[in-house]
Image (cartoon, rainbow, N blue to C red):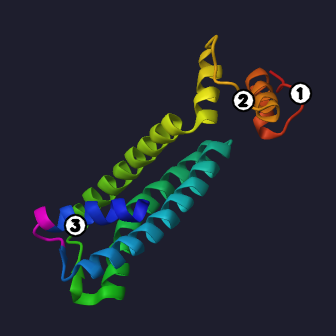
Amino acid sequence: MDVFVYVVVLNLAIQYVPSVISETFTLSLLTAVLLKVALEAVIFIKGVILGRFHAATTRSGRWTSAVLLWVAAAGSKMVVLELVDLVFGDAVSLGNFVSVTVLVVALLLSRVQCAAFCMTSTKATDPQAQSVAELRAGSSHPVPLPPPARAAVTRRLSRPWSRSGERDPPAR
């Protein structure tokens, strides 16, 4: 689903930003797939760096992680530019650093909005998702769940710490 959203955002950029160019729709579709793969890799790398940042116990460890995060954030745009140039040559151009940054931000925001929309539409059509939402909200008239699902929801609601697999509540 992300690829189709990326195609729409990329083609809007092609239409309205003069420095973003793709010769054909097929190339814009392939560029969207390439952007999807590249952005997934960048998000993974940033997650690892953020994990190191939060795990750092010293000030120098935090500074090092912060600098690495900044390098990954800025460097990823350059990697995207070079990757598109390497794969597609002159047939596709994403413009300069600023246009790629705006494009990547637009892609990530559209991805978040698409995920939120999909979650909303799932809750509207899936009876079990509705009943979980109603149980969490404390509704007195939830849609009945089958016994195994009801037990699982009740366990999750009564012991939120059990999501990580722990049997006892965390020590404070």
Residue 11, above or below 138: below
Q: Is residue 45 magenta?
A: no
Residue 48: % across, % down: 61, 56
Residue 119, above or below 106: above
Between 172 and 112, the residue placed more toward the observer is 112
**Residue in the picture at 50% in, 63% down:** 40
Which residue does the numbered mark 3 point to in the structure image? 11
Q: Tell us which disc is closer to us: 2 or 1.
A: 2
Question: Circle 1 sits in a helix, a strand or a loop, which is it?
Answer: loop
Relative placement, left or right, of 159 versus 87 is right
Between 89 and 160, the residue placed more toward the observer is 160
Badge 1 or badge 3: first in the primary sequence: 3
Please identify the dominant SS of the magenta region. loop
Residue 168: % across, % down: 89, 27
Residue type, numbered disc 2: Leu
Q: Which mark is residue 145?
A: 2
Residue type, numbered disc 3: Asn
Question: Circle 3 sits in a helix, a strand or a loop, which is it?
Answer: helix
Mark 2 surroundings within 10 Å by alpha-carbon count, few (fewer than 14), some (14 through 19), many (20 or more): some
Between 104 and 130, the residue placed more toward the observer is 130
Residue type, numbered disc 1: Asp
Q: Quadrant of residue 95?
A: bottom left
Which residue does the numbered mark 1 point to in the structure image? 168
Badge 2 or badge 3: first in the primary sequence: 3
Q: CA distance from mark 2 to mark 1?
A: 27 Å
Q: CA distance from mark 1 to mark 3?
A: 51 Å
The part of the chain drawn in magenta is: 15-20
Q: Is residue 19 magenta?
A: yes
Mark 3 surroundings within 10 Å by alpha-carbon count, few (fewer than 14), some (14 through 19), many (20 or more): some
